[in-house]
Image (cartoon, grey):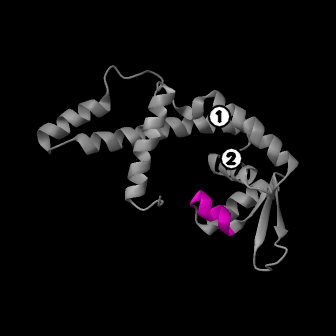
């Protein structure tokens, strides 16, 4: 993020120029806005999580384990729910385990499956990190609760259209 706000909206300016020189700019302006807002959100969330020694991916993993019935899930299921490649899940779990926030356990009935279980330290870290990201509104500023719900609904339409999930 720049230290001083620009005296104009660069995306609106780009849209005007796009419209004049290339053609309809509606989609370009929307996508560019989403990409810029993603940078703003990522920066805010990263800053909130950094004092807790977490990245957003590791925070999501702790939250997912907290939401599970037993506090543990197979690594494969974690990957599916977090929509991550198995290698990424392994890296996340490796870091969380090194920090004592999760532990790997053998599955009681399937020797090929490893369960990841959140520890008490993981619960405490997740709780503190949740307070931190909630305090900054997950990086979303300037929207009402209703507008935030509308934004979520609109983005879900895009995600559904590309097969991210089914209803």
78 or 34, nearer to the observer = 78
Q: Is residue 167 in view?
A: yes
Disc 1 and disc 2 in contact, CB within 8 angstroms:
yes
62 falls in the magenta region: no
Q: Earlier in the sequence, mark 1 or mark 2?
A: 2
Query: How would you rate the neighbour count of disc 2 (Cα within 10 Å): few for under 14, some for 14-19, many for 20 or more?
Result: many
Seen as rendered, the residue at the extreme front is 167
Residue at the bottom extreme of this rendering: 111
Q: Position of residue 87 (x, y in %)?
A: 63, 67
- Local SS, label 1: helix
- Taking the spot 42% from the left edge, 62% from the top edge, the residue there is 163
Left or right of 151: which side holds 52? right
Which dot marks residue 133?
1
Q: Is residue 122 above or below residue 88?
A: above
Q: Which residues are magenta?
A: 76-83
Q: Nearer the viewer, residue 56 or 147?
A: 147
Q: Is residue 79 covered in magenta?
A: yes
Number of the label disc, if any, that sits on residue 48: none
- In the rendered structure, the answer to whether residue 17 lies left or right of residue 60 reads left
Kind of element beneath mark 2: helix
Q: Main secondary structure of the magenta part?
A: helix
From this viewpoint, which residue is outermost toward the left?
A: 20
Relative image position of residue 70 (x, y in whole percent): 80, 57
What residue did someone put label 2 on?
A: 59
């Amino acid at each position: 993020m720049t230290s001083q706000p620009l005296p104009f909206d660069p995306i609106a300016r780009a849209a005007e120029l796009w419209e004049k020189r290339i053609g309809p700019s509606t989609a370009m302006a929307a996508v560019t806005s989403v990409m810029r807002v993603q940078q703003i959100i990522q920066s805010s969330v990263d800053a909130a999580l950094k004092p807790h020694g977490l990245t957003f991916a590791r925070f999501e993993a702790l939250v997912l384990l907290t939401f599970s019935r037993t506090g543990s899930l197979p690594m494969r299921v974690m990957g599916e729910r977090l929509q991550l490649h198995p290698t990424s899940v392994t890296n996340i779990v490796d870091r969380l385990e090194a920090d004592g926030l999760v532990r790997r356990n053998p599955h009681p009935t399937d020797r090929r499956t490893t369960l990841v279980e959140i520890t008490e330290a993981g619960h405490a870290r997740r709780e503190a990190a949740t307070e931190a990201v909630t305090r900054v509104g997950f990086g979303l500023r300037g929207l009402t609760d209703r507008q935030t719900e509308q934004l979520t609904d609109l983005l879900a339409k895009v995600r559904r259209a590309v097969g991210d999930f089914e209803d």
